[in-house]
Amino acid sequence: MNAYDMLLTRKSVRSYTGAHVDDELVEKIMLAGTRAPSGMANEPWRFAVVRDPKVKGEIAQLTKHTKVLEGADVLICLFMDNSVGYNATKDANTIGACAENMLLAAHALGLGAVWIAEILKNKEQVTELCGVDGSRYDLMVVIPVGYSAENADPNPRKNSVADCIISRK
């Protein structure tokens, strides 16, 4: 699949088969994340990989998307390292680009994933469950990863590109 088709066919996957995802694939997903653009090359992304069923279950209870997190084979918790940041908006954009690269990589590798940001209401608890220093690292998103149990067709969008254009000069 070429890159453009990959972009157009990626979808948020919220249901998984339960099959094991090899560590090599998880590493590839994170590697793709580290290839995101990063202003001043500060690369503020940091990852906590959660496979332990007990920890995964405890994290899953901290979001309304409990079944999504419980069903995934692995959770990749994406943190921002505040010790290397220099602009909150720019650094948040960088983390968003990292997360999107990870979602695209999962799709390219035949996996399903979605980003869960609603869990941020409980970011302190997630940070603690991951064993991460909350004074240095900020949880930005949790990415459940697994083999998709869903139809492969991408979800339709509400708006066409034409509907999204607000100015042409």
Image (cartoon, helix red, strand yellow):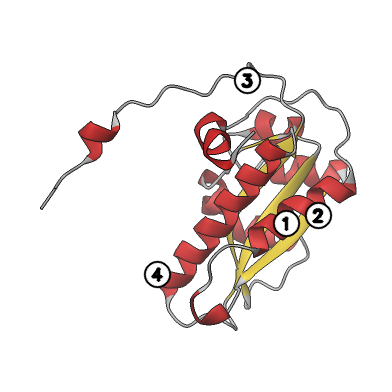
Badge 1: how crowded within 10 Å, few (<14), some, or many (20+)?
many
Q: CA distance from mark 4 to mark 1?
A: 22 Å
| Of callouts 1 and 3, the N-terminal one | 1
Q: CA distance from mark 2 to mark 1?
A: 5 Å
Q: What x and y, as percent, mark residue 161?
A: 28, 34
Q: Indicate the secondary structure of the residue bearing disc 4.
A: helix
Q: Which residue is located at x 52 percent, y 52 percent?
A: 121
| Of callouts 3 and 2, the N-terminal one | 2
Residue under circle 2? 27
Residue type, label 4: Thr
Q: What x and y, as percent, mark residue 25?
A: 82, 46
Is the Cβ of the residue at disc 2 closer than 8 Å to that at disc 1?
Answer: yes
Q: Which residue is located at x 65 percent, y 71 percent?
A: 134
Residue under circle 1? 30
Badge 2: how crowded within 10 Å, few (<14), some, or many (20+)?
few
Q: Which residue is located at x 42 percent, y 22 percent?
A: 156
Q: From this viewpoint, is residue 129 visible?
A: no
Residue under circle 4? 89
| Of callouts 2 and 4, the N-terminal one | 2
Q: Is residue 95 above or below residue 90?
A: above
Q: Closer to the observer: label 4 or label 3?
A: 3
Is the Cβ of the residue at disc 4 closer than 8 Å to that at disc 3?
Answer: no
Q: CA distance from mark 3 to mark 2?
A: 23 Å
